[in-house]
Image: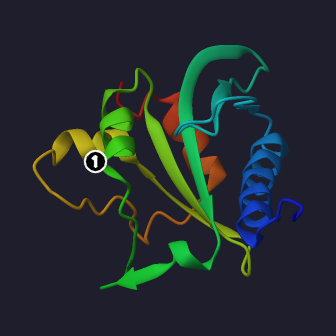
């Protein structure tokens, strides 16, 4: 009989989630990790106003990390979610950010997946993530504060 095996992907996943949680904490926002039954949402970010008030404005977040998520095509990082996740994110009651985190550079890239999926529903394989959206957490906070992410 063998012991359970701990795979490299387990470490990569944790490092990506931890990097996002740390970045959100550094800019004074609230990160809530999904503690159990993660089926496509790793956590939520709640916007905190400059005065320090929790506002109730939230977005859901799915984080992917590791080299397999960095397939470049024509200047974009391309991510093709499974059909079950596309269906789930498109119908989720909150905006859903997909964040891919590069462990080597400690940079993250993001896209509002729910918005993209709703705007282009007929594509079989959906390009969700664009390279120009290199994660600027301050820019993300600005979008949250101005209701820039569609609900």
Is residue 136 toward the left or the right of residue 106 in the image? left
Coordinates of residue 122 in the picture (x, y in percent): 10, 49
Residue in front for this viewpoint, 1 or 42: 1
Q: Residue furthest left?
A: 122
Residue in front for this viewpoint, 89 or 109: 89
Q: Residues within 10 Å of mark 1 (few under 14, many from 20)?
A: some
Is residue 46 toward the left or the right of residue 133 in the image? right
Q: Residue at x 69, y 23 (%)?
A: 49
Coordinates of residue 103 in the picture (x, y in percent): 73, 74
Task: Identify the residue position indicated by label 1 in the image.
Answer: 116
Q: Is residue 10 above or below residue 88?
A: below
- Residue 126 image-quadrant placement: bottom left
Q: Is residue 21 above or below residue 102?
A: above
Q: Residue at x 61, y 79 (%)?
A: 67
Is residue 11 toward the left or the right of residue 142 in the image? right
Figure colour scheme: rainbow
Q: Is residue 151 above or below residue 26?
A: above
Which element carries disc 1, helix, strand or loop?
helix
Q: Is residue 50 above or below residue 18?
A: above
Residue in front for this viewpoint, 146 or 116: 116
Coordinates of residue 74 in the picture (x, y in percent): 30, 85
């Amino acid at each position: 009989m063998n012991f359970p095996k701990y795979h490299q992907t387990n470490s990569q996943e944790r490092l990506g989630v931890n990097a996002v949680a740390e970045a959100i904490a550094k800019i004074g926002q609230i990160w809530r990790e999904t503690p159990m039954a993660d089926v496509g949402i790793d956590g939520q970010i709640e916007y905190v106003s400059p005065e320090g008030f929790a506002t109730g404005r939230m977005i859901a977040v799915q984080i992917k990390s590791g080299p397999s998520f960095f397939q470049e095509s024509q200047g974009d990082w391309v991510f093709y979610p499974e059909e079950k996740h596309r269906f789930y994110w498109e119908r989720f009651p909150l905006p859903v950010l997909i964040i891919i985190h590069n462990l080597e550079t400690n940079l993250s890239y993001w896209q509002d997946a729910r918005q993209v999926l709703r705007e282009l529903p007929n594509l079989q394989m959906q390009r969700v993530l664009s390279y120009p959206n290199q994660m600027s957490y301050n820019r993300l906070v600005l979008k949250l504060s101005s209701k820039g992410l569609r609900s």
